[in-house]
């Protein structure tokens, strides 16, 4: 099942706004499409989710002051 074009664009825009590489948006879109088609096993989906979250979140750095 294809994703809605507006959802794809929202993902791409969010990735741009966070100064991430465009490949991240494409991976997220591919992941969502695969989930919709049932092409990913639970383990694959969990592994992709963990990698994606790791790529888009930053660890909090303590304030030096």
Image (spheres, rainbow, N blue to C red):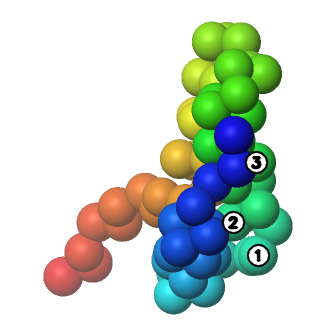
Disc 2 from disc 3: Cα separation: 9 Å
Other-residue count near label 2 (Cα within 10 Å), few / some / many at <14 / 14–19 / ≥20: many
Does 1 sit above or below residue 25?
A: above
Q: Nearer the viewer, residue 50 or 3?
A: 3
Name the residue at the left extreme.
65
Instruction: Report the quarter where the N terminus lies.
Output: top right
Q: Are marks 1 and 3 in contact (CB under 8 Å)?
A: no
**In the image, is 26 to the left or to the right of 14?**
right
The answer to whether residue 3 is seen in the rendering is yes
Residue 45: x and y in percent read 65, 24
Q: Which numbered tag is attached to residue 22?
A: 1
Disc 1 from disc 3: Cα separation: 13 Å
Disc 2 from disc 1: Cα separation: 5 Å
The residue where tag 3 is placed is 30
Residue 49: x and y in percent read 58, 36
Does 17 sit above or below residue 56?
A: below
Q: Nearer the viewer, mark 2 or mark 3?
A: 3
Q: Which of the 4 quarters of the picture holds residue 26? A: bottom right
Q: Nearer the viewer, mark 1 or mark 3?
A: 3
Other-residue count near label 3 (Cα within 10 Å), few / some / many at <14 / 14–19 / ≥20: some
Other-residue count near label 1 (Cα within 10 Å), few / some / many at <14 / 14–19 / ≥20: few
Residue 48: x and y in percent read 68, 34
Q: Secondary structure at mark 3?
A: helix
The residue where tag 2 is placed is 25
Q: Mark 2 or mark 3, which has the lower sequence index? A: 2
Q: Are marks 2 and 1 in contact (CB under 8 Å)?
A: yes
**In the image, is 15 to the left or to the right of 25?**
left
**In the image, is 54 to the left or to the right of 34?**
left
Does 63 sit above or below residue 37?
A: below
């Amino acid at each position: 099942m294809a994703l809605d074009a507006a959802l794809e664009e929202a993902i791409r825009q969010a990735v741009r706004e966070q100064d991430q590489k465009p490949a991240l948006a494409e991976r997220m879109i591919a992941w969502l499409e695969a989930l919709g088609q049932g092409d990913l096993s639970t383990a694959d989906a969990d592994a992709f989710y963990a990698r994606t979250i790791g790529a888009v979140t930053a660890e909090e750095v303590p304030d030096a002051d």
